Amino acid sequence: MSEMEKFRAEVRAFLEAHCPPSQRQPIIREEQIWAGKKTQFPSEDARQWFEAMRDKGWTAPEWPTEYGGGGLTPEQARILQKEMARMNCRPPLYDMGLWMLGPALLAYGNDAQKATHIPRIVRGEARWAQGYSEPSAGSDLASLKTRADDHGDYFVVNGTKIWTTRADVADWIFCLVRTDPEATKQQGISFLLIDMESEGVSTAPIQLISGESEFCQTFFDNVKVPKDNLVGELNEGWAVAKELLKHERKLMGTMESITEKVDVGLVELAREHLAFDENNKLSDRELRQGIARHLMNDEAMASLNERMFHEFKAGKSDPRLPMLVKHLGTSELQRKDELILRILGNQGLSWESDRTSPNIHRMVRNWAYNKAHTIAGGTSEIQLNIIAKRALGLPDQ
Ligand SMILES: Cc1cc2nc3c(=O)[nH]c(=O)nc-3n(C[C@H](O)[C@H](O)[C@H](O)COP(=O)(O)OP(=O)(O)OC[C@H]3O[C@@H](n4cnc5c(N)ncnc54)[C@H](O)[C@@H]3O)c2cc1C
């Protein structure tokens, strides 16, 4: 048995022993386990599953063991990921620290910052929010105005961040701030970690059309932030910001793996709701082609991911490929949602009703919710601009 086969057998045994059957179901939004002081477990099974993964360091499988991570090689981490997918295991932990800040901190943080924050992220002890966007700095992020003025041992931060997802329940927020107002755009920006309990930090909910309030606006009013919380060099936060965005976009491109999933394939769903002809073919030809196109694109995405993994392992990564992943992954997910709605027909109008099943409501709500993915983490238009310029080498207009 090869080393990797041995590892796979170990992983299987571990998952069999520690992942209760209730945690081998498609995840639903209300049962996601978010990090932080206010973590709530929907059930004892969920707590047990989270704790087993946390103690093994497999909430962050590839992070160094000295910080509590799993210390796995990329190949081992991939085996773990595939085995979890095969057994339908739920993600054990949700947090922006895990997905975005951690990798950036491992690359740019100093020893003290890593020792303080990384283990807490692995253990789900602190929930992080992202403070990038501002009311007049979204796509043009580098025009941000929140400022951090140097006061000796600390900065004083003033300004506001918008669309800060669940900052109201976060323990910490990572922020881009302007530390040199004279410098041109990207040059005068720094990357700061701010404790949400600091005096002068407040949040105001933003109501969404769905009635939910996932976003906040976060305000900083003379907030004192110790200089120890500066990540990377002063005025060079843009490099940290870009490293973090790389991870955010990779995550967004594979969003379906962590968001609520509808446990049904398109073909099965079509069989349930639509007519098939005597040759066992879906009668609606256009829809049939749409489903076939989606299934092929899905396969192509899986192959692209596989290719990127093997190139990475061989130390021959093509830097252009990750630029494509967010745009391709998010637009394909939206195409799938449109197909689902077409299959559901009139039932796809159902948002909440006793007459349709909760599974249908979930599909319809996902259709609305997944529209956000081509905006968050950089809009598709901006992604296409980046691909045109950096991947294809096209000139500026
Ligand atoms: C679900 C969700 C969660 C989010 N969470 C967070 C968070 O936690 N923290 C955070 O900081 N931000 C968050 N955001 C904000 C997100 O990063 C911004 O919405 C995004 O960067 C776009 O900025 P904007 O909304 O200001 O749109 P704008 O930049 O005003 O863009 C408006 C439209 O103009 C287009 N456009 C702009 N410039 C160009 C150009 N040069 N070429 C072509 N088209 C252009 C855009 O593509 C878009 O269609 C979140 C957004 C969403 C939807």
Image (cartoon, helix red, strand yellow):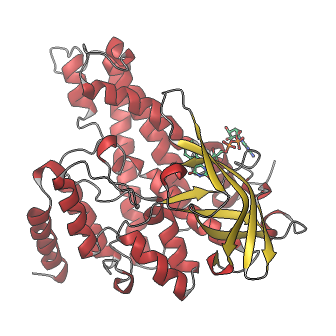
Q: Is residue 262 above or below residue 184?
A: above
Image-based side of 189 in relation to 321, left or right: right
Q: Residue at x 31, y 52 (%)?
A: 40
Would you identify the image quadrant in which residue 224 lies? bottom right
Residue 195 in picture, x, y percent from top left:
57, 66
Q: Is residue 30 above or below residue 49?
A: above
Confirm whether residue 289 shows in the render. Answer: no
How many numbered discs, if any?
0
Q: Residue at x 18, y 61 (%)?
A: 48
Q: Nearer the viewer, residue 368 or 154?
A: 154
Residue 8 in picture, x, y percent from top left:
16, 72
Confirm whether residue 32 shows in the render. Answer: yes
Q: Is residue 56 above or below residue 184?
A: below
Q: Quadrant of ligand 1?
A: top right
Residue 123 in picture, x, y percent from top left:
34, 70
Q: Nearer the viewer, residue 117 or 342?
A: 117
Q: Residue at x 70, y 48 (%)?
A: 138
Q: Nearer the viewer, residue 29 or 104?
A: 29
Image-based side of 18 in relation to 316, left or right: left
Q: Residue at x 63, y 52 (%)?
A: 202
Q: Which quadrant of the rendered structure holds the N terminus? A: bottom left
Residue that protrudes farthest toward the front in the picture: 199
Residue that protrudes farthest toward the right in the picture: 182
Residue 173 in picture, x, y percent from top left:
57, 61
